[in-house]
Image: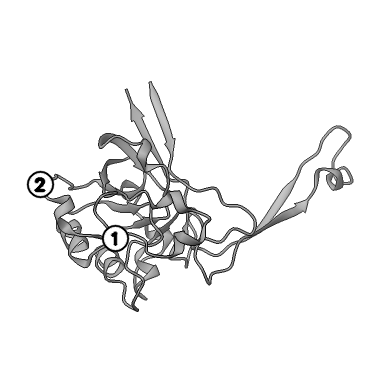
Amino acid sequence: MTTFIDLSHTIEDGMITYNGLPAPIICDWLTFDDSHKVYGEGTEFTMQTIELHSNTGTYIDTPRHRYRDGHDLCGLSLDRISSVPAICIDASRSGRSINASLFGGLDLSGKAVLVRTGWDQHWRTDQYFEGHPYLTEGAAIHLRGQNVALVGIDSFNIDDTSGGTRPVHSVLLDADIPIVEHMTNLSALPHAGFLFSAVPPKISGMGTFPVRAHAIIDS
């Protein structure tokens, strides 16, 4: 039996993911009623348009997000973002600053490492934007040294945003390790023994974009 677990937030019209960034605008381009003027009797369609900032909902960061010469969404290797052996690390009792010790003694090579902080409980509230948990630069260096495939987190940002630097983004994306932020429902995952996927569209020139992140568990 195969179980699929959705780990993505729903993107809705007017939704704020990150203070200061525009909300998505979703509307009909063609309504069912208007389509009657185009199609034969009994046949109707609807189509929508969306104006979307790339950092909306649950999204993936590629090296292009941080580095001018980094690859964009088109350069993502599917073996890093689709059906990747994964591990979920419980950081809910680690405080705001999550350091390398949380990952000590674990075989993380080639795995998607998902960090559960529980911060997703504040999604769509003012608290979500303040005092979020994050990884330290030392944690990022450790994960890079473990040759992980990807790092995900259910928090507002994988970095501390109180200053102007983003060391975790810098370390991981420089090593071609994608980052998935604003995840949710990680509490539904086991510690290990599942696959993880977070595949964005293949769009040239973009460094970030929403994904339908999910886990696959065979039992």
* Relative to 41, 146 lies left or right: left
Query: Which of the pair 56/79 is nearer the observer?
Result: 56
Numbered label attached to residue 96: 1
Numbered label attached to residue 105: 2
The residue positioned 31% from the left and 72% from the top of the image is 166
Using a 10 Å C-alpha cutoff, classify the residue at mark 1 as few (fewer than 14 neighbours), some (14 to 19) or many (20 or more): some
The residue positioned 35% from the left and 79% from the top of the image is 164
Residue 36: which quarter of the image?
top right
* Relative to 110, 119 lies left or right: right
Q: Secondary structure at mark 1?
A: loop
The vertical placement of 219 against 76, above or below, is above
Q: Amino acid at mark 2?
A: Gly
The residue positioned 78% from the left and 51% from the top of the image is 30
State the quadrant of the N terminus: top left
Q: Amino acid at mark 1?
A: Arg
Using a 10 Å C-alpha cutoff, classify the residue at mark 2 as few (fewer than 14 neighbours), some (14 to 19) or many (20 or more): few
